[in-house]
């Protein structure tokens, strides 16, 4: 018997910290050796002239999830994970989304039932908490954290999901106690509501007004407020899908003050602008997501935030709603912007877009690319070093990347079920060629080789990132009887 099941040979291996020429020996789904020259494996993969990278970790995507408006995503756990794999992503962390009135237990069971038989790559879950009752926070959440769901998202906007500041404090207090990582959708609900009403009253119904209603000030204000609440409670927090400089600056300033505030951004904020929403008829609906894409200056601010470390994570926020009557056009041809399901697809193009425009154009180093697309997410969500790196002992989740392949994006190339891509026609250089998930070759030569249900559920550890700093606001004197535990 040979020592290795698979050897990836002659490639340039990159991690978040190193770029090195070495071979990778794989056995039982894990990396067992890294060396200049390894003996032959049963399966040999020649990666000469190629980059060998950790498979991407997409820590923000919506798969087989109903929106708060009752629209089901086009991708289920089969098509969503197949599409991810073709794009070089080998691990996803989508949401198990609670609606008001539901128990977390029933929600999580439902998502396990959806994912288990279909996923072709490994997956964890975050929760979405829309109804933080004492029962949910005090009993259900601790049990789920023990079961490996250690992060959750809360919303400051959307009628059906939003928490007020009082509820945010309750949730942050519990999260600190339990060591869960809180992800926040930060937009000021009343600003959006007020602007939307005025726009609609004036007859402004087109998709482009979505970007006006979701003003960047609404994002900046809510981000700053969320940070202050985090500071008050000494609960680390990740601000998701940041779109513009207002929120970016608030996060950066908080980090400079030593607060444990993390930031995430997504392809739509680098490669789309509000002008994309301004198309004939309802065509702009294809680009409606929240927060919305902004302008070229905002794109530059987001690039800078990726470069200078304000953002740790680059995820897709894949929210696959078809441009037809099942989803974006559910309310018919005369729908106004408030009636359009929010979200854009991006799970398959996340890595190619950032590689081409980031590494290819000299904005990011290869190591930064790996950190942003894989390693940091694995670290933040308690999956490192099993996922997000190439190291002895890590799962052999590996992408062999052709840095020279030129591709013109066309929806026909993709494997999701959304029916369109917002990036149609974009010229990219660099493409994932061969993808391994736990040592199995799941994508090669443009073909899938993975059984439905072959992806495993991942229990996430409690995140290091979620440890409090110990710096509670001085006014919160632990010796007072607050009726809650201050750690
Ligand atoms: N905004 C969200 O908050 N979630 C899904 C997609 C979107 O646009
Ligand atoms: Zn969101
Ligand atoms: Zn989202």
Image (tube, helix red, strand yellow):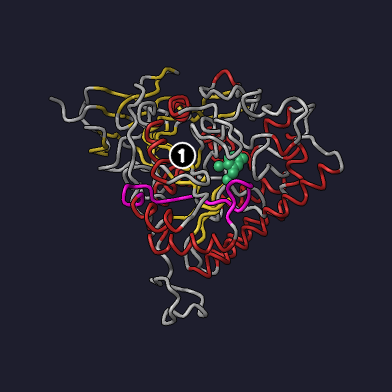
Q: Is 223 situated above or below 410? A: below
Q: Is 433 situated above or below 112? A: above
Q: Is 61 situated above or below 194? A: above
- Name which residue lies at 43% across and 69% down: 469
On the rendered structure, is 12 left or right of 200?
Answer: left
- Name which residue lies at 28% across and 23% down: 44
Cβ of disc 1 within 8 Å of ligand 3?
Answer: no
- Name which residue lies at 34% across and 47% down: 148
Does any portion of residue 267 appear in the rendered image? no
Q: Which residues are magenta?
A: 144-163
Q: Is 407 situated above or below 237? A: above
- Name which residue lies at 59% across and 37% down: 357
Crowd band around label 1 with a 10 angstrom C-alpha radius: few (<14), some (14–19), many (20+) = many
On the rendered structure, is 296 left or right of 133?
Answer: right
Task: State the image quarter where residue 267 is shown.
Answer: top right
On the rendered structure, is 190 left or right of 417?
Answer: right
Question: Magenta stretch containing residue 155, yes or no?
Answer: yes
Expressed as whole percent of the image width and height from the top left, the position of residue 420 reads 62, 24
Q: Secondary structure at mark 1?
A: strand
Expressed as whole percent of the image width and height from the top left, the position of residue 315 reads 52, 42
Residue for badge 1: 94
Question: Magenta stretch containing residue 319, yes or no?
Answer: no
The foreground one among 477 and 54 is 477
Expressed as whole percent of the image width and height from the top left, the position of residue 483 reads 43, 73
Secondary structure mainly formed by the magenta segment? loop
The foreground one among 472 and 421 is 472
Expressed as whole percent of the image width and height from the top left, the position of residue 458 reads 33, 41
Does any portion of residue 210 appear in the rendered image? yes
On the rendered structure, is 333 left or right of 414?
Answer: right
Q: Outermost residue toward the left?
A: 1
Q: Quadrant of ligand 3?
A: top right
């Amino acid at each position: 018997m040979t020592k290795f099941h698979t050897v990836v040979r002659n490639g340039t291996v990159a991690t978040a910290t190193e770029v090195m020429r070495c071979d990778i020996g794989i056995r039982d789904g894990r990396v067992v050796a890294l060396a200049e020259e390894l003996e032959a494996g049963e399966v040999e993969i020649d990666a000469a002239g190629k980059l060998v990278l950790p498979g991407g970790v997409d820590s923000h995507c919506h798969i087989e999830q109903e929106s708060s408006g009752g629209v089901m995503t086009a991708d289920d756990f089969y098509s969503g994970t197949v599409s991810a794999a073709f794009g070089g992503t080998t691990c996803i962390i989508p949401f198990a989304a609670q609606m008001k009135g539901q128990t977390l237990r029933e929600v999580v069971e439902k998502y396990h039932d959806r994912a288990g038989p279909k996923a072709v790559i490994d997956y964890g879950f975050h929760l979405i908490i829309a109804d933080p009752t004492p029962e949910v926070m005090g009993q259900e959440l601790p049990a789920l954290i023990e079961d490996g769901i250690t992060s959750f998202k809360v919303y400051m906007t959307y009628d059906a999901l939003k928490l007020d500041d009082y509820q945010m404090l309750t949730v942050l207090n519990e999260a600190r106690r339990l060591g869960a990582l809180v992800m926040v959708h930060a937009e000021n609900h009343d600003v959006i509501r007020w602007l939307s009403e005025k726009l609609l009253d004036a007859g402004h119904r087109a998709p482009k007004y979505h970007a006006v209603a979701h003003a960047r000030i609404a994002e900046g204000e809510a981000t700053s407020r969320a940070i202050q609440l985090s500071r008050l409670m000494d609960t680390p927090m990740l601000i998701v899908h940041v779109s513009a400089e207002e929120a970016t600056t608030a996060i950066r300033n908080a980090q400079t003050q030593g607060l444990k505030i993390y930031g995430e951004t997504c392809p739509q904020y680098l490669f789309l602008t509000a002008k994309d929403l301004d198309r004939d008829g309802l065509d702009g609906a294809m680009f409606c997501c929240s927060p919305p894409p902004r302008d070229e200056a905002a794109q530059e601010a987001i690039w800078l935030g990726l470069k200078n470390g304000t953002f740790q994570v680059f995820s897709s926020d894949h929210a696959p709603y078809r441009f037809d009557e099942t989803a974006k056009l559910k309310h018919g041809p005369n729908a106004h912007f408030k009636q359009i399901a929010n979200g854009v697809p991006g799970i398959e193009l996340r890595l190619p877009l950032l590689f081409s425009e980031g590494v290819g154009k000299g904005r990011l180093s290869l190591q930064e690319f790996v950190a942003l697309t894989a390693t940091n997410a694995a670290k933040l969500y308690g999956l490192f070093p099993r996922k997000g790196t190439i190291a002895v002992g890590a799962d052999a989740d590996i992408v062999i990347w052709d840095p020279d392949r030129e591709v013109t994006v066309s929806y026909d190339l993709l494997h999701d079920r959304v029916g369109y891509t917002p990036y149609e026609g974009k010229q990219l250089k660099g493409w994932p060629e061969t993808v391994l998930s736990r040592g199995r070759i799941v994508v090669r030569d443009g073909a899938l080789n993975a059984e439905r249900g072959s992806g495993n559920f991942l229990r996430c550890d409690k995140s290091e990132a979620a440890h409090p700093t110990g710096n509670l606001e001085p006014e919160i004197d632990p010796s007072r009887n607050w009726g809650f535990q201050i750690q």
